[in-house]
Every structure is written in C-alpha cells, then in structure tokens.
Amino acid sequence: MTQRQERLLYVLQRLSALVLAPLVILHIGVMIVAVQGGLNTAEMLARTQSSTFWPVIYATFFVVAGVHGCIGLRNILTETTELPARSVNRISGGLLILILVFGFETVRAIA
Amino acid sequence: MTDISDQYQLTVNIWRGNSDGAYQTFEVPVRDSQTVLDVVTWIQRHLDPDLTYRYACRVGMCGTCAMTVQGKPKWTCRTRIGTVVENNELTLGPLRNLPVIKDLATDMVPFFDKWAEAGAQFVPGDQVPEQMAAVAPDSRARRAADVAIECIGCGVCYAACDTVAWREDYLGPAALNRVWTLVNDERDGDRDGHLRKVAGESGCLSCHSHQSCAELCPKHLNPTASIAGLKRKSFLLALVGRS
Amino acid sequence: MTAHRKNTARNHPAWWAFALHRLSGLTLVLFLPVHLFVLSRALEDGNQLDHFLTWADTPVVKLAETALVVLFAAHMTGGIRLLAVEFLPWQDRQKTFIAVGVGVALATGLVFLLSAFSGGA
C-alpha cells in the first residue's frame, strides 16, 4: 500500500466517523423509543416505510459504518496478529463486502 | 555522622542476560531518599561487578539511565526508592521495544535509525541566509515548536509506546515529535518534505493517542499532541495535495 | 521469560480509553453483519424476524442489548474525543473528556435498559 493510499484510508476513517456520530445518536434514540413495549416487525416496518428518509438514512448508515469498521479492523489485525498485509486487507475487505451485501438486503427489506 | 536508622533491606530483582535471560534477586540496604540509580550502582560495586547498566550525568539531564522500573520506563537517577517500592520489592529491567545487549543496557541504534528515517533533522535552505532569521517567539508555529523542542532523545517514550511494540516500522513518538518542531520551523528548507516523510502508517497516522509517551516523558513533553498536529497537516495533504 | 514482567506503563485513563475504543469497535464491526442479516429476514419472511424477536424478548437478551448500546455509545463518545484531539487544538483535560464520555455512555445504556423493560411507549 502506498503512502498516498494509507492517507486515503486515514481520511476515510475520520470522515466516516464525522458522518456516523449523528447517525449513531439518531439510531440509539430510535431504538430507545422502539424497544419500549417490545420489538415487532410490523411496528418497525410501519416506521421505516413511512418515508424515504429512513431507507436513505439506514443505507448511508450501513455503508459508512462498514467502511469505518473495516478500516478499524484492518488496524487491529495489523497490530495484534502476525498476518501478512495481503491477508489483513483481504479479511477486512471481505467483511466489508459481507456488511454491504447484508446491508443492501436489509434496506431492501425495510424500504 | 550519617544517621542510617531509616535504612532497610530491599529485595531487588534485576534482569540479567539478553532477551533470553532471567531475573536475578539481590538484597540491598536502601533508604527511601536514595535513587534507583544509587541502588543499581551499589549492587554493581558491592555484589556483582558483572552487572551491566548505563548512566552519565546522574542528575536528570542526559537521559542515559533510562530503564524499566516496576514496569514503567523512567530515568533511574530521578526516581526515588520511596516512590516506587511495593511490598518491599523493586523490579528493574532494560527499556522495552529495543534489543537487549546485556542486563539493563539496550541497543539504542534502532531508536536513532528511526529518527533518521523520519528525517528528524534540520534541513538548511539552498543558500546561506544573509541575515539571521527573525523568528517571532510568539508566532503560533514557533510556540508549537518550542513546546516540543526540549527532547533529548532518551527513549523513554519509545519504550512506553505500544504502537512501537505492535508495528515494527512505526517511527515512534520521539522522532515524530521532533519532525513536528521542524514542520513548524520557518527556517527549515523543506518543511513540506518533512511532513511527507511521516504522513503515512509508519508515521503519524498510526498513533492511537494512548498518551503513554506524554504520561512518562521525563521532560513533560507531549508527543501525542505533536503527532496530532502532524495528523492535521497530513489530512490537508491528502485532501488538497499540500499542507 | 521475557525481560519484562507486567507493563504498568498502561495504567492511565487515556490508555484505558483506547482499550475501550478498540474492544467496542471490534465487537461492533463483528456484530454488524449479524445484525444486518437478522434484520434482512424481515423481507424474506416477516414471520421469521418476528420469530427471532419473540425469542429475543428475554431479560438476558435485553441485558446483552444494553451492553451493546453502552459499547456503541462509548465508542461514539470516545471517537468524538479523538476527532477533537486530531482536528482541534490540544486540550490538556483529556481525562475529563474521557470521564464524561464514559458517563454519557453508561447513562445512555441505563435509559435503554429502562426502556427495554418498560411495558409500553
């Protein structure tokens, strides 16, 4: 990985953090309301299908969270394992793909 | 006549050998007001002349006597026995993150190699200036440099840093701190070059702001803050191509 | 034996804050794909998600969810502190920020816990 690419990952990590902070606050707030009286699918879909706001928010959320988390995972793997850089990148990238695929399925399910 | 009524016997465990060695235990008469360096010297003079350790000024100016004291890197000449003894025991080892030559002496070459690799030395301009540079001491850049300038390269921060332990190529807090002073030095001939050398994962981007360096620096410097400054400039470099 | 027994250089708040940030981040990034997979079952078969939600409606699961919320909030507050360290002028009172961050995270968890065990909105 070139120094330029390393800087790009760093920038993505911090920018994604900035985007995530308000989304996390929103999500925890929604969950605190939603969890009262128990969770059920109908209640959730009524909320998420009520406006395009929610699918857009959650689509943004999973993409940005996936990028942020997997860059973080890459650091953790680099620093706590003896795995070569190529393996570290593949594992992190693989998890990102998994998150993107399941995230897409979720947004499709709730839109 | 010296009053030695406050003297007591202390169990001192000292690392012997290189990285493949063991702790050796000594019983030493000490006073709380003595320094750890006093104790090590006493052991070498009275119990085992074979004990290897380093010191020079013994008054807290040169940084040579840095060792691991009860698990923390410190200057032994500035560490009083009374402040570190626990359960009547004292454990001493060589600095972490560096190859052990013997006992309490480490090979400092990797530390200084990284200093050079980081480009942490002043780069003169193309021509000899006609006059002395008039550097305003209260300019923001000069204040930033001055706060970080007193590093004497003792290696305590390097030994304390976990990122150094976890990443073989990480340049370390001391080298990066020095680069920060140069990036802020208007007399330096290649401030942009200084930043580019460290604006990567082997440099400032890998610092996780543990602040162990700042906690333990004997000169109360703050490499975490300096590295944060380098991160800011790296961010700009990534976005607009220059800092 | 290595030349170093316990590493006491880590005995300070900023290091604990790092440890919390890293552990919470790791937990969250491994939890996320599982979370998204479960939620996506809402489309395939609405009953499947409901089935899971009913199974999950136990005190133990609610406590686990609360723990996740605490980790989530702590990761965020710690992250905001780091963004401030890296983008704003240095502040010496990092320990204060760390303490406030942990406090906010625990309070958030408590609010969630109370909500999870409450009968209805």
Image (tube, coloured by chain):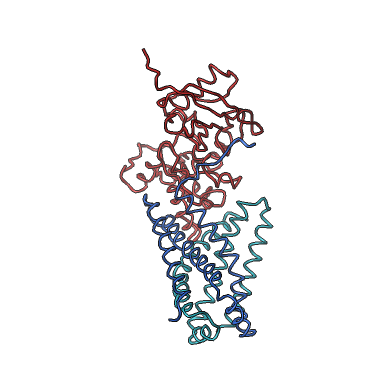
- Residue B140: give x, y in percent of width and height: 34, 48
Q: Which of the 4 image quarters holds residue B105?
A: top right
Residue at image coords 39%, 58% = C100
Instruction: Count every numbered label the image shows and give the total.
Output: 0
Residue at image coords 48%, 23% = B9
B87 relative to B1, above or below: below
Tell which of A37 and B81 is nearer to you.
A37
Q: Which of the 4 image quarters holds residue A90?
A: bottom right
**Quadrant of the frame with the N terminus of chain B:** top left
Task: Residue lying at the far top in this picture: please name it.
Answer: B1
C110 relative to C43, above or below: above
- Residue A17: give x, y in percent of width and height: 48, 64
- Residue C116: give x, y in percent of width and height: 48, 74
Q: Is residue B71 left or right of residue C85?
A: right
Tell which of B84 and B129 is nearer to you.
B84
**Quadrant of the frame with the C terminus of chain B:** bottom left
Q: Is residue C11 left or right of residue B103?
A: left
B111 relative to B184, above or below: above
Tell which of B9 and B133 is nearer to you.
B9
- Chain C shade in the render: blue
Of all chains in the rendering, the one displayed in red is B
- Residue B160: give x, y in percent of width and height: 51, 41
Tell which of C35 and B207 is nearer to you.
C35
Of all chains in the rendering, the one displayed in cyan is A
